[in-house]
Image (cartoon, rainbow, N blue to C red):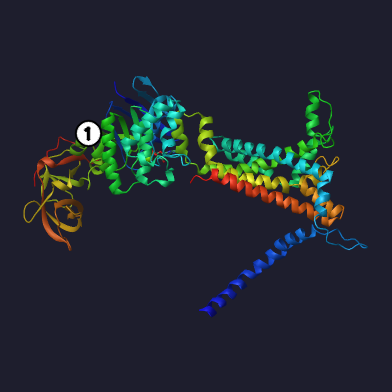
Amino acid sequence: MSAIELSGITKRWGGLVAVDNISFRVEEGTFTVLLGPSGCGKSTTLRMIAGLEEISEGKLKIGDADMTHAAPSERKLSMVFQSYALFPHLNVEENILFGLKIRKIPPEEQSARLLKVTDLVGLSSLLNRKPSQLSGGQRQRVALARAIIAENSICLMDEPLSNLDAKLRHDMRIEIRALQQRLKMTVIYVTHDQAEAMSMADKIILIRDGKIAQEGTPDALYDRPATAFSASFIGTPPMNILNTVISDNGVMIESENHTPVLAKSASPVMLGIRPEHVKISDSQGIPAELVSGDYLGAETVITARIGSQEILVRAAGRVRVTKPVAAHLSWSDQNIHVFDSKSGKRNDSVQGLAV
Amino acid sequence: MNRRLSKSHIYGWLLLMPAAIFLIAFTYYPTVATLAKSFFSQGTAIKPSEFVGLENFESLLEDDIFWKIAWNNVVYAVGTIPISIALAILMAVWVNGRLPLKSIVRMSYFTPTILPMIAVANIWLFFYTPDIGLIDQVSRNFGFASHNWLGDPDTVLGCIIAITIWKEAGFFMIFYLAALQTLPPELEEAAYLEGASRWYYFRRVMFPLLMPTTLFVLINAVINSFKLVDQLFILTKGGPDNASSLLLYYIYEVAFSFLDQAYASTLTVVLLAVLALIAIGQFVFLDKRVHYR
Ligand SMILES: Nc1ncnc2c1ncn2[C@@H]1O[C@H](COP(=O)(O)OP(=O)(O)OP(=O)(O)O)[C@@H](O)[C@H]1O
Ligand SMILES: [Mg+2]
């Protein structure tokens, strides 16, 4: 039994199809991330699971029960909103206890649970503050506490960290993940930040234009992207996707037209190679021109050009590129990904060549 | 340094002067003059005005008509304010929701507000007219006898109250609607996810968050209940037997029909004092409960 199961879920607004026939399952106690670019339908999917948005078509199961048309409160799940949705006139304690009061939980149990939860998220000293007197991170913790205290096994989160600064975001990422594992919660987490998804998820569901582009573990998405879109969405910097031309001597990079990079292919394909798998050398490989370098501290991301196509290369340490320099780029055949030019789908039948 | 300071002082005063002159001439002077007049007797051709101390106030205490009208005003305020505010909130919540023809409904609620009170009074005069008025025509179908709504001291104040509610509720609704639209929808969603009923959400979240608006509307409503008397001119002239007269209308009558400016001034001073007390009271007692941000 899965904790949550979506079958053919669709959402229409008039003529606009925001979510198009999505199906996936979320196992109990796992952390699932809905990832995708802005406007692809992540929030809409999450809100349909929560019951805040009507499901136009399809079936939603939570546990064993069909919850397609159930009221939000019947679904026994908690939600953390991007804007936190704290009640501004209530203090931290009242905010956290809001749901327990509605459900008329006895006061002794309320205070016991409050104690436990505030300890867990580190809010014990702030119980009398109003939300306006808290920092962004503290508000985030209150929202989290309010979601946890209900002791629902399922928790939905819609970009809960997007209003925080980079450092705090990183800390909260670790905290949320640790909390999820300690409480064995089933979490569905929405984000458009692939780094967040990679570091937190048990499973990533990558969405594009309301459809699932790929579903799998972070490793799977990184190592074997199913489409050129997944390849270019995941990883910082993302995978290089190069156009190719087919000739009698093999498949070559378009506008380089010299060195075969793939064995024979029947249909037009694109070559994918991650920036960390490209090596720069003086003589071995494909001739290229280094154009500029982006120094990031531990590494430098170099923009190079093969013919007229740009390719990013990761190099350790600091590499200065002040003016265009000639160089050669090489890679191993194991690190090559091939995608169909037309459909963008992964094509493992074409053999990559080392250069 | 000193000279520069005094020079800029002069500039400052010069810049303030036009506004200050108007303010003094049309607001402060009349107020002070009214206060002064209330301590003098009304002058006549043979007997010039003279200082009488608190005599005017004493006769006010013995003026049965004043007490009756003051009571009318209390009834009028208590009758109009809570109901028009409650209606305003109700309409705002309704019109704020998902609703077909939302803007038309909003507009129609707001229409009474943009009509001048005189026009409103004329419309309602038609409703209230005995025999041929709308109310009598409808109630006749249910077997009720014809009734002179505005001519009966028992019903006339109620009629005036109904008109005022009809006119004010739509106006107050606009403020509530504006406030409701600043409430983030996630608050409602968060509450529903926790299992809150609509009533619980209204009571625990929406209404408290509307408190600043309620304070504003309340002050307006109280001031209006003393200020808004236009309808009396058209409908009843305060009658029958002062049953529908309100303080401001009484002041108008005393000053311009009975030409007793001294007594009118005394009444004005009392009215101003009452308004000031109410305003201060509202700010002091409600302010603490209103501000949450
Ligand atoms: N209430 C609505 N009415 C009509 N269209 C809507 C509504 N809400 C969302 N949409 C549309 O549905 C699509 C998906 O929206 P959604 O909010 O799910 O995107 P998202 O993936 O969460 O994006 P973001 O990362 O920017 O939050 C968008 O094209 C959006 O314009
Ligand atoms: Mg979103």
Q: Nearer the viewer, residue B25 or A67?
A: B25
Is ligand 1 less than 8 Å from the beta carbon at label 1? no
In the image, residue A327 above or below residue A118 = below
Residue at screen point 53% across, 39% down? B208
Q: Quadrant of residue B179?
A: top right
Ligand 1 in which quarter: top left
Chain where mark 1 sits: A
Looking at the rendered structure, the kind of residue marked 1 is Thr
B181 sits to left or right of B156: left
Residue at screen point 14% across, 61% down? A325
Q: Nearer the viewer, residue B218 or B271?
A: B271
B120 sits to left or right of B92: right
Measuring from the top left, give residue A338's x and y in whole percent.
Answer: 17, 40
Q: Residues within 10 Å of mark 1 (few under 14, many from 20)?
A: some
Residue at screen point 29% across, 23% down? A2
**The residue positioned farthest toward the bottom in the image shown:** B3
Residue that numbered label 1 is attached to:
A217
